[in-house]
Amino acid sequence: MKLSRLSVPFLLFAAALTVGCQQRKPVGNNPALAVYDSMDKDIGEVAIGDKPITIEFQLTNEGDRSLHIRDVVTTCDCTDAKFSDESLFNGDKTIITVSLKTKAIAEGPFERMIGVYTSVRQRPDTLYFHGVAKHRK
């Protein structure tokens, strides 16, 4: 059977598409394991009333099974969190971005926390960030 000139590129495209669409599978029997770059970040001195400050926490799945972030909750109205709801497989990383509205904090030392709910366990992982808020001069 002779292949036409159009058939070969089409077959290569179809093969690549099939491989790319396959779901990733666990690489072993160990459960998912959420590992953070830091669970407590010192963001230093913050000027009150400036633009929001962004803090990033990196999460890596160091287990064999898939990990899914179900929700990220904050403890006050002065913080917002953004995260990806895509599944993380062995070695995959994602960033949880927290925004601190500096207009809403009082002068002096402060500490805020966020709770990260994952498919790994029922209770959230608690992450902290702290610093010192000062008025601009």
Image (cartoon, grey):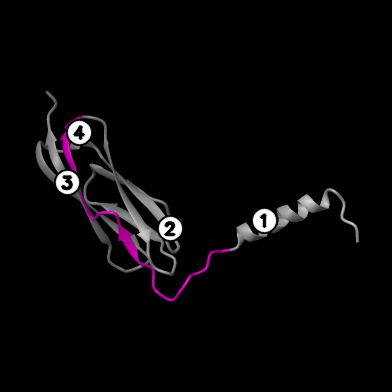
Please provide percent x and percent y for residue 41. 21, 49
Give the residue at mark 4: 103
The CA distance from mark 1 to mark 4 is: 51 Å
Part of the protein shown in magenta: 23-49
The CA distance from mark 1 to mark 3 is: 47 Å
Give the residue at mark 2: 92
Name of the residue lying farthest toward the left: 108
Question: Label for residue 95?
Answer: none
* Left or right of 91 on screen, residue 125: left
Q: For the residues carrying marks 3 and 4, which lies nearer the camera in this image?
A: 3
The CA distance from mark 2 to mark 4 is: 35 Å
Q: Please state which amino acid type lies under the numbered disc 3.
A: His
Please provide percent x and percent y for residue 61. 38, 62
Mark 1 or mark 4, earlier in chain = 1
Mark 2 or mark 4, earlier in chain = 2
Q: Secondary structure at mark 4?
A: helix
The CA distance from mark 2 to mark 1 is: 22 Å
Give the residue at mark 1: 16
Residue 25 in magenta stretch: yes
Q: Quadrant of the C terminus?
A: top left
Answer few, some or many: residues within 10 Å of disc 2's Cα (few below 14, many 20 plus, some between 14 and 19): some
Answer few, some or many: residues within 10 Å of disc 3's Cα (few below 14, many 20 plus, some between 14 and 19): some
Mark 2 or mark 1, earlier in chain = 1
Q: For the residues carrying marks 2 and 3, which lies nearer the camera in this image?
A: 2
Q: Please state which amino acid type lies under the numbered disc 1.
A: Ala
Q: Secondary structure at mark 1?
A: helix
Q: Residue at x 28, y 62 (%)?
A: 124
* Left or right of 110 on screen, residue 71: right
Give the residue at mark 3: 130
